[in-house]
Image (tube, rainbow, N blue to C red):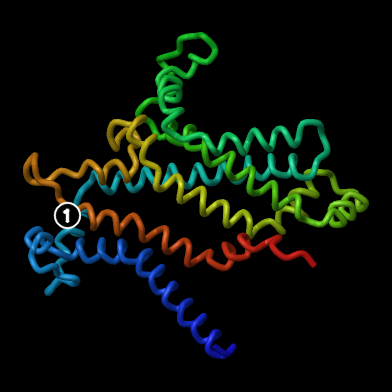
């Protein structure tokens, strides 16, 4: 077998593997869209309809006419944006300190932050639930009148448990990779450490900020366990994920799959739009530091 034949077989194999991977990743979303455009009878019709004829938008009308769904969507926006903003602000300060400033225990602190990202969420739900119900319990006091249970604040604080360590750890590596000559030049010109961070180094980490911000937003947007554990209803801040899970049909035994699929498509679209808007920054952030000149 000559080199040309081997190269041709390699190209064909690559295309086949790529096609399988694309199908595996996109088919669930395609099937959600198709299912959202079907009536209840079409969902269980045999043979399977891979595209409804004609499509119906009744499921979307039901979803958008639900005040509960609209309010839960608004709760998700508030919680996710707030968590992302706090994670980026606090995480960038912490990453700059760990990555650029000399002090004892930097390595240990970084490993502790990394270890915090490895804990499964289910292992901390019980203790966090106690904290949310009575914030003073960690100090041995009783301030149950300050309970954060069934509020957006409970989700914002608990979501930072997994977004803030992740953001700090990722940004630390980006701050470490920046040339020290830029920092030294700014200090020689009379800049304070904060001015060096804010005016010189932070603009260079914008691709990393966009990447980590998107990942933090996606994690907060898609989170289900804390949202269903720490909130009871949309008036208390329940986000869209548990609301979709508890969609009710016309009867107790009915599961409204069409409405659920329509809602799933609706909550996925904002993530797709954000990725398309920030795709260049995300790619730059993911590849930054991969090649050193």
The percent position of residue 230, horizontal first and vertical second, equals 36, 30
The percent position of residue 269, horizontal first and vertical second, equals 36, 61
The residue shown at (23%, 56%) is: 261
Vertical position of residue 155 compared to residue 29: above or below: above
Tell which of 90 and 285 is nearer to you. 285
Question: Relative to residue 2, is residue 244 drawn left or right?
Answer: left
- Within the image, what quadrant is residue 291 found in? bottom right
Question: Relative to residue 85, is residue 46 drawn left or right?
Answer: left
The crowding category of the residue bearing disc 1, from other C-alpha atoms within 10 Å (few below 14, some 14 to 19, many at least 20), is: some
- Within the image, what quadrant is residue 90 found in? top right
Tell which of 171 and 238 is nearer to you. 171
The residue shown at (46%, 77%) is: 13
| Mark 1 lies on residue | 62
The residue shown at (20%, 61%) is: 36
Q: Secondary structure at mark 1?
A: helix
Question: Relative to residue 66, is residue 19 drawn left or right?
Answer: right
Tell which of 50 and 16 is nearer to you. 16
In the rendered image, the quadrant that contains the N terminus is bottom right
The residue shown at (41%, 23%) is: 126
Q: Residue furthest front?
A: 1
The percent position of residue 268, horizontal first and vertical second, equals 35, 57
Tell which of 82 and 30 is nearer to you. 30
Question: Relative to residue 185, is residue 202 drawn left or right?
Answer: left
Vertical position of residue 214 compared to residue 275: above or below: above
Q: Residue furthest top?
A: 141
How many numbered marks have been drawn onto this rendered protein structure? 1
The percent position of residue 248, horizontal first and vertical second, equals 15, 43
In the rendered image, the quadrant that contains the C terminus is bottom right
């Amino acid at each position: 077998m000559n080199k040309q034949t081997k190269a041709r077989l390699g190209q064909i194999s690559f295309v086949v593997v790529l096609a399988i991977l694309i199908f595996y990743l996109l088919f669930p979303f395609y099937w959600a869209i198709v299912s959202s455009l079907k009536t209840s009878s079409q969902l269980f019709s045999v043979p399977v309809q891979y595209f409804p004829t004609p499509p119906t938008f009744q499921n979307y009308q039901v979803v958008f006419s639900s005040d509960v769904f609209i309010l839960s969507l608004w709760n998700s926006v508030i919680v996710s944006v707030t968590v992302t903003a706090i994670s980026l602000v606090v995480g960038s300060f912490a990453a700059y300190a760990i990555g650029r400033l000399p002090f004892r225990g930097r390595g240990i602190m970084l490993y502790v932050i990394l270890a915090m990202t490895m804990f499964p969420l289910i292992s901390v739900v019980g203790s966090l639930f106690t904290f949310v119900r009575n914030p003073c319990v960690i100090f041995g006091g009783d301030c149950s009148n300050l309970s954060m249970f069934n509020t957006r604040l409970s989700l914002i604080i608990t979501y930072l448990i997994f977004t803030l360590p992740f953001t700090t750890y990722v940004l630390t590596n980006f701050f470490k990779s920046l040339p020290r000559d830029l920092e030294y030049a700014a200090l020689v010109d009379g800049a304070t450490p904060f001015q060096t961070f804010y005016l010189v180094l932070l603009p260079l980490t914008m691709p990393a900020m966009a990447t980590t911000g998107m990942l933090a937003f996606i994690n907060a947007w898609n989170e289900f366990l804390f949202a269903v554990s720490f909130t009871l209803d949309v008036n208390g801040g329940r986000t869209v994920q548990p609301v979709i899970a508890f969609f009710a049909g016309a009867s107790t035994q009915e599961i409204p799959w069409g409405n659920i699929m329509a809602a799933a498509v609706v909550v996925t679209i904002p993530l797709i739009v954000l990725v398309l808007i920030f795709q260049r920054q995300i790619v730059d952030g993911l590849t930054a530091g991969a090649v050193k000149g």
